[in-house]
Image (cartoon, grey):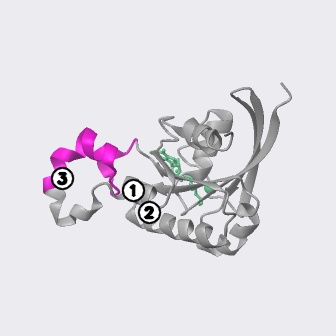
Amino acid sequence: GNNSMNAKLVLLGDMGTGKSSLVLRFVKGQFLEFQESTIGAAFFSQTLAVSDATVKLEIWDTAGQERYHSLAPMYYRGAAAAIIVYDICRMESFERAKKWVKELQTQGNPNMVTALAGNKCDLADKREVLTEASCVSWTLSLVSSLSSNATLVDEAQAYAEENGLFFMETSAKAAINQKDCLVLNQFSSQQE
Ligand code: GTP
Ligand code: MG
């Protein structure tokens, strides 16, 4: 029908976590092993059908390098949804993701839907950030060997729940959840 809306979506997260790769996978169905680091930000638009509505997504893929941090508010201001991306193989990128969550909680639009995406889940053997799902499926057997670091268990999922974030692990490379991550979770909650 006549049901159409525009929605601004912003991707935030440390450099190299795969923000541009998730967007490229989503918009063009492609993946590049040597994706160039984003300068400033990149814009994409994509129209899609969600239930019987048409949503025109205006996607801002920001640059993760610290020197661009001060530009971020320009991109998350007025955004309907934010996806904060970390790399499951780099704990430091998860810590950085938490800082983004704090920044959005204090300075972002309070109605903004926020999702946390643990990207590169195809690289499970290099995993540093654990989740409930990963624990159940394959890490459980390793947990004892990681017990020196037992607080890592379920860290991401639990953190997301505490902070009211949608959460999923994704892979731009293996095309896992990248679409759900960018679309379904973001808007299902807004249509009610
Ligand atoms: P900045 O623009 O610097 O903030 O980085 P970014 O977050 O946009 O990361 P980018 O998409 O440029 O990806 C960084 C590197 O990770 C690239 O070499 C990608 O090929 C790789 N990469 C991205 N997503 C995945 C993934 O899901 N799995 C694997 N194995 N590699 C990935
Ligand atoms: Mg990028």
Judging depth in this view, the residue of 8 and 16 nearest the camera is 8
Judging depth in this view, the residue of 78 and 174 nearest the camera is 78
Query: Where in the figure is residue 145, as x and y percent of width and height?
Result: 14, 56
For marks 1 and 2, give the CA distance.
8 Å
- First along the sequence among labels 1 and 3: 3
**Please, what is the three-letter code of the amino acid marked with disc 3?**
Val
- First along the sequence among labels 2 and 3: 2
Residue at coordinates 22% horizontally, 64% vertically from top-left?
149
Look at the numbered disc 1 and say if its residue's Cβ is closer than 8 Å to ligand 1: no
Query: Where in the figure is residue 18, as x and y percent of width and height?
Result: 54, 51
- The residue where tag 1 is placed is 156
Q: Which mark is residue 94?
A: 2
- Which quarter of the figure has residue 63? bottom right
Q: SS class of the residue under badge 1?
A: helix
**Please, what is the three-letter code of the amino acid marked with disc 2?**
Phe
Residue at coordinates 27% horizontally, 39% vertically from top-left?
137
For marks 2 and 3, give the CA distance.
19 Å
Query: Where in the figure is residue 135, as x and y percent of width and height?
Result: 26, 46
Q: SS class of the residue under badge 2?
A: helix
Per the rendered image, the range of residues in magenta is 122-144
